[in-house]
Image (tube, grey):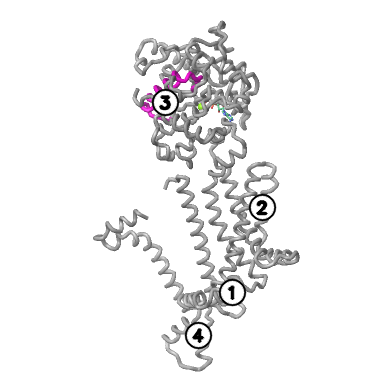
Amino acid sequence: MTNSALALSASGGGTLRQHPLFVRYAPIATIVLALIVIWYIAAVLMNLSLVRDGFEREETPYTVSELIEGTMSAERPLLPAPHQVISAFVDSVFGYAPTAPRSLVYHSAVTLSATLLGFLLGALLGIGLALMIVHSRVLEKSLLPWIICSQMVPILALAPIFVVVLGAIGLQGLLPKSIISAYLCFFPITIGMVKGFTAPDPMQLDLMRTWSATPRQVLSKLRWPSAVPFLFASLKVAITISLIGAIVAELPTGAEAGIGARLLAGSYYGQTIQIWAALLAAAVLASGLIGLVDLTERGVARQMGTRS
Amino acid sequence: MALGMPKALKLDDPDVTLPRDVRESFVASSELVGMNNTADARIESTASPQRLAVDVRDVSLTFETADGKVDALSNVSLQIADGEFVSFIGPSGCGKTTMLRVIADLQQPTSGTLLVNGMSAEQARLERRYGYVFQAPALFPWRTIEKNLKLPLEIMGFSDSEQKLRAARYLALVNLTGFERKFPWQLSGGMQQRVSIARALSFDPALLLMDEPFGALDEIVRDHLNEQLLQLWDKTGKTVLFVTHSIPEAVFLSTKIVVMSPRPGRIIDIIDCNFPRDRTLEIRETPEFLKIAQRVRVGLRAGHSYDE
Ligand SMILES: Nc1ncnc2c1ncn2[C@@H]1O[C@H](COP(=O)(O)OP(=O)(O)O)[C@@H](O)[C@H]1O
Ligand SMILES: [Mg+2]
């Protein structure tokens, strides 16, 4: 931070191309720009026949520019143009009270709470399983195949079963969604933490032995800290999976609220723009969550003196 | 004395808690010891009732590996009195590390008996009677230098104030006062190794096991650490078992040099080496020094020809 600030003031006389902000963001901006251009072209191509059919059905004469304009302002386009998605997104985020059922903020909050709870449960489960696996070869042999199997069953098939079974025992709303989300996200955490807990150098383990440390001390003073980089790597994967899990859990259950519910409603009524706006909300949520994990990681890394 | 010994280790300093018996015994202890081995049964002294720091009798250790058995130690016997400085020298794979690991109870012998401080190796380990220094510093990268020093103390349940006191004292001992808050990667290899020596000393074990501690360091740093180690040994009266590849290092430091040879790992010569305790590096030019070095070299060569 201070570095770039310094560079900023120092480069006052330099050209734009040497500006640190330019150097940092130019590649990203270029790619985003290219994607947007491709998106517009795709939107025009994909919606072309739709719009032409419309004109022809109404038997109004049209020019090429009218046609192209039409492809970018259709009410239910096959592929909405970027500006349509953004305006729908902005509209449904800022256009309503955050608690209104048409507000994307409301739906995002519903999905977010299931995501966070699922993530928490998944992290606890994932770390717990990793601990068991690391501490016992028998458990490793008996647990690991089941853990791997659990991830081979398609979640779309499992989700309705979960919801029905959990509903039968009186669990509804947030919890079933969180459980599905936890079911998906514990896996990378288990795998990552098994690796992390076994990361210590044999020499460090020998040292602990020469001090006759208890297994608990070995865990807290050696295995845990060694696992931290692995923990954050797997948490980053897990939190996005957890979000996907929460959204997927909303799909087959006829949920009334949540990003999944918006996607579902959008596809029922052919509201493609609404679908894309909901997807955009999911993307914003995902990057926010990853950003949060990233920030925590950096804080922890600083505490642990990680060389930067 | 290039780095100089800190004041903290004056024997009359009330801050230094050395066991009384150690202070009194070390003068006498350098005199003697019975060392003995089956290959060449020389008994050097029998009269002294000197307490043995390490008593190895007829110990063998065979590793079962995928491609057959490896006799890492074969009928090794060795008696080391309190306060001795014993170097182990020999070609790679002759069992020096294995010897130290067996004494440290990091590895169990296949046969033979072993007493450390008059008790079984396991008992000695559980009672934290020795400090072990590995070839690499093996510091914990997420701990500051001070916290690295405190690690064994935390594990052994020393009080906070005692931990602080000892960390400061032993950092001073290895001339690293002022580096408390640094992380290991901010120190040079030689400094890190000094930290690991301080760490091994921090809980004041009477026995120090060092496995090629200076192997990875350059000549100058090595000479320097040799002098420091010698002074430390002279002042604390600890028993030191020291593995090295370097003949001059062995001759300079030791009261006894144990020459080993591989396949099967055994002791082929034990050489007395009683230079004045306050010797300096200059003695390396003296005829006595060269004579002993020559004898070690001959022993090593004999060990080799046995093989080829
Ligand atoms: N854990 C082990 N498993 C199998 N063989 C080993 C093991 N540790 C050491 N050895 C073998 O035992 C012999 C002695 O090894 P070591 O004590 O490390 O020798 P040194 O320290 O003198 O170089 C070598 O031949 C080595 O390959
Ligand atoms: Mg070795």
Q: Name the residue under label 4.
A: A51
Q: Name the residue under label 3.
A: B8
- In magenta segment, residue B218: yes
Q: Which amino acid does label 4 sit on?
A: Val
Q: In this view, does B153 lie above or below A269?
A: above
Q: In this view, does A305 lie above or below B31?
A: below
Judged from the image, the secondary structure of the residue bearing numbered disc 3 is: helix
Q: Tell me whether the residue at label 3 lies in contact with that at label 4, contact meaning CB atoms closer than 8 angstroms.
A: no
Pair 1/3: label in front:
3
Whether labels 2 and 3 belong to a single chain: the reply is no
Chain at numbered mark 2: A
Q: Residues within 10 Å of mark 1 (few under 14, many from 20)?
A: many
Q: Position of residue A5 (x, y in %)?
A: 33, 57
Whether labels 1 and 3 belong to a single chain: the reply is no
Which residue is at the far top? Answer: B47
Determine if the C-beta at disc 1 is less than 8 A from ligand 1: no
Q: State the separation of the CA atoms marked 1 and 3.
A: 72 Å
Q: State the separation of the CA atoms marked 1 and 2.
A: 32 Å
Q: What residue type is labelled 1?
A: Arg
Q: Earlier in the sequence, mark 1 or mark 2?
A: 2
The residue positioned 50% from the left and 32% from the top of the image is: B162
Report the magenta residues as a range: B216-242
Give the label on residue A262, or none. Answer: 1
Q: Residues within 10 Å of mark 3 (few under 14, many from 20)?
A: some
The residue positioned 46% from the left and 29% from the top of the image is: B198
Judged from the image, the secondary structure of the residue bearing numbered disc 1 is: helix
Q: Mark 2 points at which residue?
A: A147
Q: Is the magenta stretch mostly helix, strand or loop?
A: helix
Pair 3/4: label in front:
3
Q: Can residue A224 be seen in this view?
A: yes
The residue positioned 46% from the left and 81% from the top of the image is: A72
Determine if the C-beta at disc 4 is less than 8 A from ligand 1: no
